[in-house]
Image (cartoon, rainbow, N blue to C red):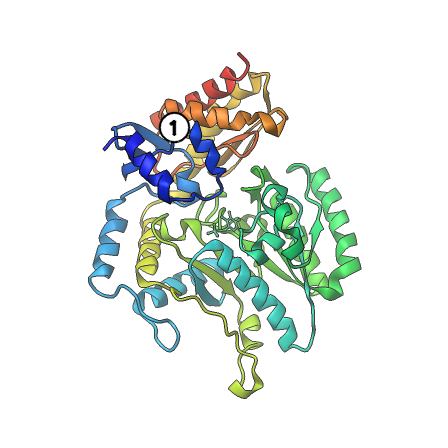
Amino acid sequence: MKNQEIMEIDLKYNWHPCTQMKDHEFLPIIPIKKAKGIYLEDFEGNRYIDAISSWWVNLFGHSNEYINSKIKEQLETLEHVIFAGFTHSQAIKLSERLCKLTGLDKVFYADNGSSAVEIAIKMSFHYWKNKGKIRPLFFSLENSYHGETIGALSVGDVGLYKDTYKEILIKNITIPIPKDKSEEETKKALKKARIVFEKHHKDVSALIIEPLVQCAGYMKMHSPKFVKGLRELCNEFDIHLIADEIAVGFGRSGSMFACEQAGIKPDFMLLSKGLTGGYMPLSVVLTTNEIYSAFYCDYTELKAFLHSHSYTANPLGCAAANATLDIFDNENVIEKNKEKSKYIWDNIQIFKKLPNVKEIRQTGMITAIEMIDYPWQKRMGLKVYEYGLKNGVLLRPLGNVIYFMPPYIIEKKEIDKMIKTAYEGIKALND
Ligand SMILES: *Cc1c(COP(=O)(O)O)cnc(C)c1O
């Protein structure tokens, strides 16, 4: 079958995520037949560099031989089992590794990022309730994104996704972010944060942040010092810190976890996306013994965390995650990425010369090129997206921001092609 035929059947039945479906009257849906390494291949044999790691999940390429083999092995042993009253060796192994890597003590599983956010905010609120305090509010950062379910959307701040639902969201209080990574802006923002903390802290359970990079928030970046300053405010005012590392975890930020660069430990850390190398839906909420112990008592005290998902700690997902961690153990991933980040940074300096580029920025394996403030109705990002596809690169701009978040296995000549395509796509907008 040809792409066109498949698309027609697709559109008859499927409602795609984060999409105005009417766009597909002019914008083709691309049916992918197979994928290998950093390449996606459609039904007509066209290949696309997956420069956004299939929505930020893929780390070591599609159809990675090692991860494939570990999932197949697991499939022959145990595909799934209830995780209440039962356990299995993949989850035990994974939890032990994640605790060692993060310095946290306990792992609660879910199956997607938004659910992990819901769990963390419920757990934090519930912790305070178990301690006899009712703290119904949450702090979150300006321009933040934490997912699309009601609780996660509530603590987010991207109007495009949130505004429609404002009448049905839970209450949160927004803290301003620094304009950039500079010391001066960081200090200014922390001063403003302190004022908000002073005013509301008694009613607030937790502050939730995306450390270092607000990915869905147009790839805005801040310094590790900002994260450290927020940790200190949380300590001072006795509020939990939830680090949402769903997008930046597993090396994306340049270190295994972004919190490492700030030298801090959160009360909750949320991981998903890269957790399984981009293979399976799985997420975790890591927390401390201190939090855990507030729920640990006789059943009749009714303090248990009675939250669950059907696919909690799915063994296939855990096997994919363990295989992904094996690769981190066996290959010098973080160091090798540093070289690649630098290569990308050196090679995007030319974008500064384009009259329609406002800023370039990078944190680890996340590189963003912000164009001038084109009115959103013009959908200039979409034009770059279309240009990319025509030229064999999947870029998926966020408004006027074009970014690269490729699988870590990308090679120099593929980086060259990715950059060249984005450059020409942005340049073409001036013509
Ligand atoms: C993607 C994302 C989420 C939501 O994860 P889903 O699996 O898409 O529900 C939450 N937080 C951040 C920072 C994300 O990037």
Of all residues, the one furthest to the front in this rendering is: 12
Which residue is more in the foreground, 114 or 225? 114
User: Could you tell me residue 156's position as x and y percent?
Assistant: 61, 50
User: Could you tell me residue 431's position as x and y percent?
Assistant: 53, 11
User: Could you tell me residue 341's position as x and y percent?
Assistant: 45, 34
Q: Using residue 249 as the reference point, say whether residue 277 is left or right of it.
A: left
Q: Residue at x 52, y 74 (%)?
A: 305
Total marks shown come to: 1
Q: Residue at x 60, y 71 (%)?
A: 126
Residue 59 visible, this angle: no
Residue 70 location, quadrant: bottom left
Of all residues, the one furthest to the left in this rendering is: 76
Q: Residue at x 54, y 88 (%)?
A: 300
Of all residues, the one furthest to the top in this rendering is: 431
Q: Residue at x 57, y 68 (%)?
A: 123
The residue labelled by disc 1 is 393
Residue 309 higher or lower than 396, as above or below: below
Q: Using residue 73 as the reference point, say whether residue 300 is left or right of it.
A: right
User: Could you tell me residue 87's position as x and y percent?
Assistant: 34, 72
Residue 303 location, quadrant: bottom right
Q: Using residue 412 as the reference point, say whether residue 307 is left or right of it.
A: right
Amino acid type at image mark 1: Val
Residue 319 higher or lower than 179, as above or below: below
Residue 282 visible, this angle: yes
